Every structure is written in structure tokens, then in C-alpha cells.
Image (cartoon, grey):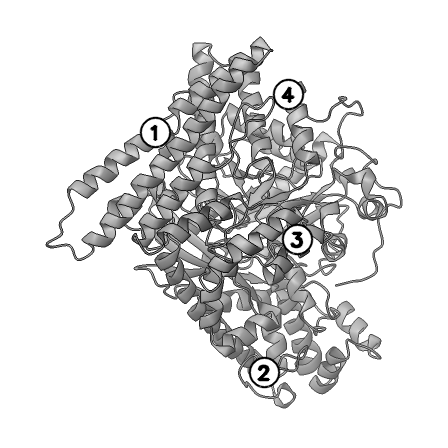
Amino acid sequence: MFEKINPHTAIPERPATSEGNFYASEKTKIGPGMNERIQKLRKLSFETEPSLSIERALHETSFYSESFGKYAVPVMRAMNFLDHCKKKTIYIGEGELIVGERGPKPKCVPTFPELTCHSVKDFNVLNSREMQRYTISREDIERYATEVIPFWQGKTQRERIFSHVPKEWKAAYEAGLFTEFMEQRAPGHTALDGKIYRKGMLDFKREIAANLTALDYINDPEATDKADEWKAMNISCDAVILFAERHAEMAENLSNIENDPRRADELRKIAQVCRWVPAHAPRNFWEAIQMYWFVHLGTITELNGWDAMNPGHFDQHLAPFYYKEIAEGSLTRDEAKELLSCFWIKVNNHPAPPKVGITARESGTYNDFTNINIGGVKYDGTDGTSEVSYIMLEIIEELHVLQPGNSVHISAKTPDKFLNAATQVIRQGHGYPSVFNPDIYILELLRQGKSLQDAREGGCSGCIEVGAFGKEAYLLTGYLNVPKILEVTLNNGIDPVTGKKVGIRTGDPRNFKSYPELYAAYLKQLQYIVNQKIQVSNYIDRMFAKYAPAPFLSVVIDDCISKGRDYYDSGPRYNTSYIQCCGLGTVTDSLAALKKHVFEDQTFTMDRVLNAVLKNFEGEEYLRQTIMNRTPFFGNDDDYADEIAVKVYNDLVRTIDGKPNIKPGGKYHLNMLSTTCHVYFGKVMGATPNGRLAGKSISDGTSPSHGADTHGPSAVIKSMTKFDHVKSGGTLLNQRFLPSLLRKEEDIRKLGQLIRSYFTLGGHHIQFNIVDTATLLAAQACPEDYKDLLVRMAGYSDYFNDMNADLQQEVIERTENDTF
């Protein structure tokens, strides 16, 4: 909100070309990593530019052209998946131990024309834009134009959606009152539990066969639909087994021509692993990692879900294999770390599929949001940390790559030793790991109707939203621009940016006699906009159930097989739809300014404030400065503002929480997540009554407005915990500290104490940027000196120099704390 940036220090605290804040000065010749293999793989992954592959689109178009209408939709989807797994290019890179790519090579992303068929213009934009560029050859663009686009025109999910939406929804969408996740991608944010470490695809096939045998075509009216779904699941299992066997065959062939005996042995071992998993349950640490990776690739190749599949509590799943092999002497700690490092780099080789238009603006990043949950509690409530947890923290610090995202889960039962190890990594300034409170999110999941065991096995799938791992479809439907709803209210249903009617008439606020009258109008507008969003989200949900089922994903999510229903068609045990609410700080501070200065102190009239806002405060700097300096703002442990925040939050809960979606027992819930959408939402807004200028970012998640939190982090967490986080499915809190604040061991312990205090008070999540403003400004001026600089954006980290100027400025303008 405050444009003038005054760094605490003029000299950057992070040295140029440094890997982080407190790394040793000596470097390896190749780059970060525990040994030469990992250093080379990491360097290749870091330096490879993301590209687009049309291979999947060509295979799918050919298959659908020949087979469309011949089979039931789920069977058709599964056969298409199998066909692609038979034909797709197989890649095994030099030195790799964990194998498999979604595209034909690392960082090469397929397209999904059944969802959104990119135009030639889209490809030209993706190929040339400055940020989040994806290279594609002119030959591939021309081939896509002649072979892919003509077939898919009129058949895509995106076209189905936009041909259906009412004009009121479209007006609100185009004004930026909300976004829609599924207009370019499938529903996502899915995480697995531990079943794939106990069962292989052949075990799942036996379950499916038993259900098919027991089908009752006389008394079960859904028998035919169930049969189609089970057949599709069965084919999908075959597809993934075949995909693995093709890797085994390639590894064997490479071993026969490999001159290095050690590498030849590794390739034979890779072949052996791929012959066993995913057909069978893994028997050791290596097979367990490869098992997950094949399942991960299967789900993100079958359908382009909104954000990638997640392994959930990966350390808990791998720990039994680790301890067993350590005891047997068949695995060393360094060997386990090397395998996990290979996995980390493999995830980093998979950037998010390309986004264009509004979807690119709401989530402008290569990050595909795989989130490794580390620590937390086990299904029985005991501490979930293990030696694997500590190995993962070491890898995060050593590799500091964009992906996978990672989070530590700190319960009351988590040992201080683990919290201290996590804060040692946090202080390096990569934005990883973020920190979650299982004691609170378990209560959130219980409130939503999960069993205690399912809640304990749950956690975070992507950014900050939580669900029951391996048992729930929790679909993120899009962001809600809460400050924009107030803006439309203050203009009686009109969007002042475009002059178009986008809301309902709630009265001219110049005629309101009291603050409760203003708030009642805002609440009426909120209810209208939320209903507009939900009615179309429900329609989209049904379109995916009918036309884009995911039979392979359904295999690995509980109750889909037993019900004979798809993941997108009520198959999972739990079915949740989330709306992500943005801008709590901005709307709270705007309401506080109007309440105090217009209705209580009567310093300014409503007419004067609204006219000042419409003019972007031009000629009204005295009014603006009065508001910014003499209004109680959220984030300072001031009950005046905090009580408004609590009411706004509670009314969002009342408006959204518990509304039915289209699935039996399924409901809507809210979480307070923004990704990069708070920057986009700010761009489509004029100035706001809290002094924020037109086009500037609104506040992210539940964090205070930029620069408004002036009383330090302790005051912020007190403000944050005055509302009940258990009512949500996730809240997001960003904090930024000077690196010098965490120079000593006692300082690191203080950071851990701050986290413990916040979680004891009821906080859901907190994350940190440990970077000074001078370093960020230096990175803008000399990006080549800060290629490795990762910063925490919202529920993910991103390379500072991969972010556009607006996103960079948003991070720079966050409050820079030099004390706890």
C-alpha cells in the first residue's frame, strides 16, 4: 500500500552470487548438491528452459478421430491414456536413478486440447512473452494448427463452459470479482495416502475384477455406469504398468551399450525396479520412491489437473522402508539421500502446464505446487518425524530448487529438534519450507465431517488448503476478490473501472446514515456474487464428471473402486469444493477507514472519500495521509480493526461454508489463499478507502495490507488469531524478516518460539521471506547476480527474476521486520 520503500540497510545483506543468506563461501565447480551426480542433474534442471510438446495432443487427436463415439466416455479416456503410454517418447537421462517424464524430455510440457485447445496466437504469446515463457518450434505450431485445432474446435471443456455461463456471471468474471480455475485446467489439488506402498496396480486390478464379477444388472440401476468406470480403471492400471515396462526395456538396452560398468549396473537396477513397480507394491526405499513417481506421472499425464498430484506425508510413507533397509545393511543414509535428491530434481523438471489470459494472471508461475508434507502426526496421533524428515530438510537446503514445494508440520508433539532444523533452513531465505499446524487443521477437517484417522492422515496439498489425503476430492474453484465486492457496493452495483453493471443495486452509500447500513449493503453484494460463482462452478463440476473423467486417479483414491464412480463424479469418500477468498487486510482496512472517518469522527463525508477514491486521490493527499496514518489497521493487535476483520471473516464463512455442491454430501468451504491473484485483483480495481492506489496489489491471503502492520510480528499473530481458523480450510500468513535478525542460534530459537506461539494461539499456517529490501532491489538491478534468489510469493516460492515487475514490487512492499 505504501509506495515509498525505505530499506533498513543500503547494502544488500545477501552477497551477490551467493546461494543463500548463510551458506559457506566455498562452492563446488558444478553447483549445489551432495555429490557430482546430484550437482550435474541439478545444474541441468536449473538451466533447462521450459518448452512445449505437442506429442500428447497429436496422439490424442489421432485416437479420438478414429474412436470418438465408439466407447463409453470413461473407457474412451482410459483407452486414450493407454494409447499415449504405448507411443510416448521415453527418456532416461545421464546419471538419473529415478526415471520418467510427462513429456519427451525434462521441462517439456504437453498440452491438453480436450480441456483448452490453444490457438496459434496462444503459442506465439507463450513462445515470446518475457515471463513464464515456453519455447515451441514454428514447425510444431504449424502442425498443431493443421492437425489438432480443427478436430477440437467446439469440443473442448473451455468452450462448453463459456457457451453456458449467464451474462451476469460473465460480467462479474470479466470485472475480476472472481476467477474460475477450471476454465483451462481440470480440477486438482489431490494428495495421496499410503495405499500405493502396500498395493501395486495388479492388486488394484484384482479389486476391480471382483467388483465387476459381483455386478447386479437386475437390481442396481447404476450397474452399466459402474461397469464402464471399472473397465476404464482396469485399462488405466495397464497403461501405467506398460509405461514402467517401457522404461525397464530402455534401461536394459542402455545398459548393454554403456561403457561405464558402474552406470551399467545402475541401469540394470533401474530396469529391475521398473519391472516390479508399479505392477507390485514396493519392497524397498528405491522402489517406493519410483512407485510414487510413476503414479504421479500417470495422474498428470492422464489429465491436466489444476496443480500437480502430491505424495502427502512422503517422509512417513518412506520411513518404514528406510529403517528396514538400514537395519539390514542394504541401504546407507547417503544412498537414501541421493535417491531422494534425484526425486527432488525430477519434480523440478516438471513445470506447470502453460496458462494464458486471466488464468495466467491469477497464477503466474512455473511452479506446479507439488507439496511435500514433512513431520506432523501419524494416523494414531503420535509424532510423525523420522530420520527421513531430517534428510529431506538437508536436501531442501542443499538444492534450493523451485520444486517440489515443501512444508513442515509442527504439532504440540513435534520435537523442538525438528523445529530447529526447519528454522535453520528457513533462515537461508528460499521461502521453503512453509509451516503448518496439524493440531488446528485436524480440527478443521473434523469440523468438515472427516473421521479422526482420516483427518490425521490429511494435510496440505498445494498452497495452504487442507484435505484428507488419498480419500478426498477437494477442488479449488477459483478466487474471490473480496475488496472488489466492497468497491462495487460503494458504487451501487457498478464497476467503477469499466463503468459496467456487475453487481446488484444496494443503494447509494452517500445516503447511508450509519456504518451498519453500509456493511449490510456489502453483505448483500457478497451473497449475490458468491451465488453467481457457485452456480457456474457446479455446472463446470458436472461437465468434468460427464466428459473428462480421470479413471487412473480414481484407482488411487479411496472409495472410487468400491463405489464404481469416478474421482470427478462423487467417487471419493469426501467431496469438497473450495472458494479462495483474497484481500482480508484490504477490505478490513477500507471498512475501518470508512467507519472511523466518515461515520464516527465525521472527519470526511462519504461523498468526499468516494470522489477521492474515484480520482485515485489526486488532489486529496491530505485525506489519503490522514486515513493511512490515523486509522486502526489490521495486523497491529488493535481491537478496532481486528473486530472488523473477524466479522468480515465470519460473514465469508456464513456465506460460503456448507453450501451444497453437485455431489451427494459434498459441500463448499472457504480458504484464504491468493497465489498471485491478489496482484491481478489489484490491477482490476481502482483506489480503495484505506489509501491504496489504483492498480496496486490487494493484501494476500489473511496477511495485513502492505506496510500496514507497524507493531511487529507478535502483534500480527495476535490479530490473526482473533478469528477462528478452524472455520476455514486454510489461512495464509506471510512475514518478512531481515537476514541479520537470524544470524545467531538464539535468534533461530526465537523464530521457532514465534511459530510455537502462533500455533498455540490457533494459527493454521505461516511462511517467511528472509530477505532484505536492499537485496531485492539489487536483484532487480543486476538479475544475473541473483539467479538463485527464491522468494515466497503466496503458497509457493518462485525465482525472483522469473516474476514480473508487479509481483516483484508486491514482495518488496511487504513489511520488513527487524525485530520479533
Task: State which tag comes first along the sequence, 1 or 3.
Answer: 3
Instruction: Report which quarter residue 558 is drawn in.
Output: top left
Residue appearing at x 44%, y 69% in the figure: 536
- Say which residue label 4 marks: 37
Query: Mark 2 or mark 4: which is in front?
Result: 4
Residue appearing at x 44%, y 62% in the figure: 155
Task: State which tag comes first along the sequence, 4 or 1.
Answer: 4
Q: CA distance from mark 4 to mark 1?
A: 30 Å
Tell me the kind of residue under disc 1: Arg
Spot occupied by residue 817 in the image (x, y as percentages of width and height)? 75, 48
Spot occupied by residue 775 in the image (x, y as percentages of width and height)? 81, 44
- Say which residue label 1 marks: 198
Tell me the kind of residue under disc 2: Lys
Q: CA distance from mark 2 to mark 4?
A: 60 Å
Query: Mark 1 or mark 3: which is in front?
Result: 3
Question: In the image shown, does 19 or 486 lie closer to the viewer?
Answer: 19
Task: State which tag comes first along the sequence, 2 or 4.
Answer: 4
CB atoms of marks 2 and 4 within 8 Å:
no
Which element type, helix, strand or loop, lies under badge 4?
helix
Which element type, helix, strand or loop, lies under badge 1?
loop
Q: Which mark is residue 501?
A: 2
Instruction: Report which quarter residue 25 is drawn in.
Output: top right
Question: In the image shown, does 483 or 61 lie closer to the viewer?
Answer: 61
